[in-house]
Amino acid sequence: MPQSNDDKSATGTGEEAAHGCATKCDAALAPEAQDAITSQLKRLYGDMLQAPIPDRFSELLADLSKGKRSS
């Protein structure tokens, strides 16, 4: 028997039932996918963390630590 709109509101939009979840799904990535994403992010941001801080940014940080406003 097809679900009415009332039935769908109890379990979400009805899309969850299409892939086996009666309540909100927590779609987890496979461990291999998580590892691949982790290594890519570390490679991307690791290089960024090794880059020198631009002079202007260092000056702004110094001004902030002194409580000085910059223009």
Image (spheres, rainbow, N blue to C red):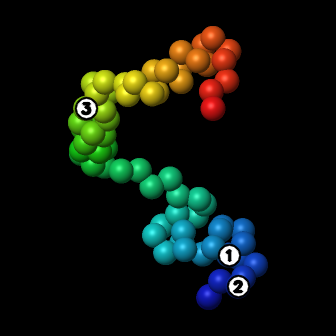
Q: Please report contact status of discs 2 and 3: CB closer than 8 Å, yes or no.
A: no
Q: Residue furthest right?
A: 6
Q: CA distance from mark 1 to mark 2?
A: 6 Å
Image coords of residue 25 (percent x, y):
53, 58
- Frontmost residue, 39 versus 5: 39
Q: Residue furthest bottom?
A: 1
**Residue at the image position 54 percent from the left and 15 percent from the top:** 62
Q: Is residue 51 left or right of residue 25?
A: left
Q: Is residue 41 left or right of residue 11?
A: left
**Residue at the image position 58 percent from the left and 18 percent from the top:** 63
Few, some or many residues within 10 Å of mark 3 (<14, 14–19, 20+): few
Do we see residue 32 in this rendering? yes
- Frontmost residue, 60 versus 9: 60
Q: Residue furthest front?
A: 71
Image coords of residue 15 (percent x, y):
55, 74
* SS for dot 3: helix
- Frontmost residue, 45 versus 9: 45
Would you name the residue on which mark 1 appears?
8
Marking on residue 4: 2
Image coords of residue 31 (percent x, y):
29, 43
Say above or below: 2 vs 23: below
Image coords of residue 20 (percent x, y):
48, 67
Q: Please report contact status of discs 1 and 2: CB closer than 8 Å, yes or no.
A: yes
Marking on residue 47: 3
